[in-house]
Image (cartoon, rainbow, N blue to C red):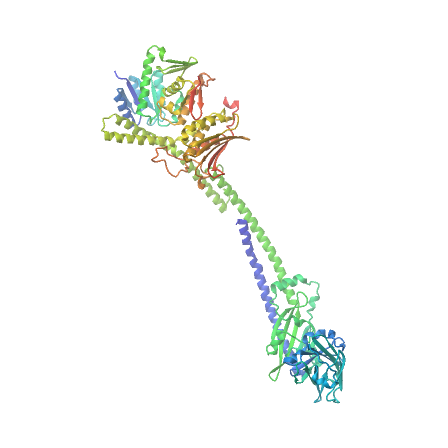
Amino acid sequence: MPRTIAIVEDEPLIRANYVEALGRIGYEVRGYASRPEAEAVFAQRMPELVIIDIGLGDEPEGGFELCRSLRVRSPTLPIIFLTARDSDFDVISGLRLGADDYLAKDVSFHQLAARISALFRRMDALRRPAESDSVIEQGPLRIESERMRISWAGQDVPLTVTEFWMVYTLARFPGHVKSRDQLMRDAQVVVDDATITSHIKRIRKKFVAIDPAFDAIDTVHGAGYRWRG
Amino acid sequence: MSLRFKLLIVALSTLVLPWMGWQLVRQTESLLRQGQEQALQASAEAIVKAIDALGVAVPVEEPVFPAFAATAPVLVDGYTDDWSAWRADLQPVGPGDQARARVALAEDRAWLYVLVEVRDGTRTRVDARDRRVWTSDHVVLELERGGERSRYPLASAAPGEFDAPADPPLRELPERILGQWQEDGSSYRIEFRLPRAVLPDRLAFALYDAAAPARADPPLRRLLRYDEDAARALARLAPERMRARLATPEGWLVADSGGLVADADAAEPDDEGWFGGLIYRGMIAPALTGTRSLDGVSARLAGEEVAAAATGRPRLSWRPGERPGEVVLAAAVPRHADGRVTGVLLLEQASRALPLLANRALTGLAVASAIALAVAAGVLVSFGALLSFRIRRLRNAAEQAVGSGGRWTGPLPLADAGDELGDLARSFGKLLHEVDAYTGYLRTLASKLSHELNTPLAIVKSSLDNLDQQPLGDGARAYLARARDGAERLGTIVRAMSESHRIERAIASADAEDFDLAALVAGCAEGYRALAGPRTIRLRLPDGPVPFHGAPELIAQALDKLFDNARSFTPEGGWIELRLARERDGVVLTVANSGPLLPAALQDRLFDTLVSMRERSARGSGEAPHLGLGLYVVRLVADLHRGHAAAHDRAERDGVEFVLRLAGMPRRRLADVH
């Protein structure tokens, strides 16, 4: 039984492209052009993963609305946001919508597919009992790689998939400087340096929200970032 | 040339006023003069006619020996001291060699004095009564009286008295002449006197020089004497305060009368003095070309006026008077008899009234026009100053607005003025507003455009991803790869376009923290070594940490941009230098590199958005396109840290220097945080 993915995107050409591409991998993909249309269908049957564009037709922030209503109905449903603007990243994280990842629309299909499969893997892992061999512990930091879950001093840090991958890359080898390029490669994103910087900044904020004394991520100017072991 | 100066020059145009007044005064003066000239000439001619009518004797025929009126007693001593008044009027006794002997005659009530001066360097001297006298140096005096003639050999063996006998002795004439003989190295002088009772009718002198024997027989000449009758007649005829003189055509004075006395007004206390005279002479008087020697009392009226009249043409002339501010008008008219000019009447009038009148007018005019000029110049200059002050204010405001990238806050000065400058200010305001709007549009254009391009780009990319999954021939794969490459590049461009927007956002949300700037610069420099390739990286840091309050990421980013910029302009094998220094109120971060100098046109605008100094685009090189945003980012970061960015050529002219002066972000007070 193939997994079902719903794509809510008002641009028909992109929608068709994604539907076809993901269908080719083996998912069962449905495309919807607007929020009411998608909500009508979701009311009857929930997909296993949702990709949402923020601007939907006449509703510039229709994607947020949809995300909120979906989250209410299912706390574990993986949701990926697609945005046309980089600046929306900040808006989304600011809204604390609980989306699992945010991607720019020009993301390559390969990167999108990597995230989708990672999210499905996480769903599967969450259903199974935790396996000890996939856990990395660094002082107060605990990373469960399969479940893509990171906790700091026993508290969950709500990271997106991209952010998880970044922290994972950094924390696996404490003290090693990871350049921005490495981070981009491991997090499967193609963005510029400034965006990496803002990603790191957001990650720090999320840790700081739990522990105000957090300063494990070191900026090595001119080189990159380092996890302080 | 400043506006004020120009207006001052314009003010000079008011000088036309006094100039015209001056011309008017001159014209009036010249008319008055003409009237005076005509009147004087008419009087002179009338006097001549009257003299003829009164039967005043016509002066004797030429040539003559003039007898001057001796005003002081003449001592017969052979010396010329008492002849000094007539030294210039010595007459040669004859032509040619005879001209070496010159004669002067003077008379007083009782005597006719004679002085003969002979230039002769050789001596052959005997006394007059010596038999050899006719072959020695001597002067023959020939006298004629009542139709009979006698000759006297004037000679002396030694300086002193001589005694010349008459030859032949006549009853009518003295039987001998006693006189004085004096000599020096080059000449000798003979002086003697004849009583007026035996005055000869005619006389002649002949020089005999023993060194150059030649006997001359010069014609007898009449004695020209001062004519008292004519003087009396002139005194009767000449108008008051005029001087009338009668002369022979040669200029020998025959009679004179009156004197040069200016109008009675001259005695008035408002004498213009030397200054008035100066003004008059400098500005009004026509050329005063008259012969000045006519002023004095002399036996001969030498001057072109007399010479012209002697040829039959009346002549008028003006000359400066003896007192300041005085002019003398002279009219010389000929006296005719039998179609020949027999004499010249010189009538002169000294005049002060005219200059006075003209001076007063001119002085008044000068004062009035000086006041007018000063007022006009003052008004124009202050007006110009006001005008240029206003224009400067407007210009400063406009320049400031342009300097700040077209951003102008608040109204321009003068915008509510009603005149043309107000119009200009309003136009400027409109223009600046347009520029502001345009700059704003440009500033946001890139990010707006990138936003709009994202969706079609996503379509292209996702379509290419899909196409990749389709069964394709090798040829098609190649095209697919190219299309993907193009799309990638397009994606880079779109991202670059929205960079400044992202930076602006990042700056807006930047949080300040305390960090060591030296460590940051050192870290960045370390990172750049890998990127610099064959170029040398030089790092100069102050000792010890440099604590700084700001956004380290943004500073690092600005440094990245500066390094990027430096690297692209540094030739391989060149150097790039990073320098950090503390300053009194902040730090100076310098990125210098060897390479080409800055284009002069861009110096001030390098840090503006969308300004690029790269001549070639990055096309074909595979690099990211250059939209001129990098240095704009630097400026934004500098602004955030209360500093500024500047770029200039190095003093050594071997490269350029980008300087960031940073003061640090303001510290927020705790109250602001919560």
Q: Is residue B308 above or below residue B366?
A: below
Count of all numbered marks drawn on residues in the image: 0
Residue B76 picture quarter: bottom right
Q: Position of residue A90 (x, y in %)?
A: 40, 24
* Closer to the camera in the image, A227 or A91: A227
Q: Is residue A130 left or right of residue B322?
A: left
Q: Position of residue B168 (x, y in %)?
A: 73, 89
Q: Position of residue B88 (x, y in %)?
A: 68, 74
Q: Is residue B129 left or right of residue B467?
A: right
Q: Is residue A10 left or right of residue B369?
A: left
Q: Is residue B56 above or below residue B488?
A: below
Q: Is residue A74 left or right of residue B635?
A: left
Q: Is residue B69 above or below residue A155?
A: below
Q: Position of residue B674 (x, y in %)?
A: 50, 21
Q: Is residue B589 visible?
A: yes
Residue at 53% from the left image edge and 51% from the top image edge: B6
Q: Is residue B239 visible?
A: no
Residue B133 picture quarter: bottom right
* Closer to the camera in the image, B141 or B648: B141
Residue B81 picture quarter: bottom right
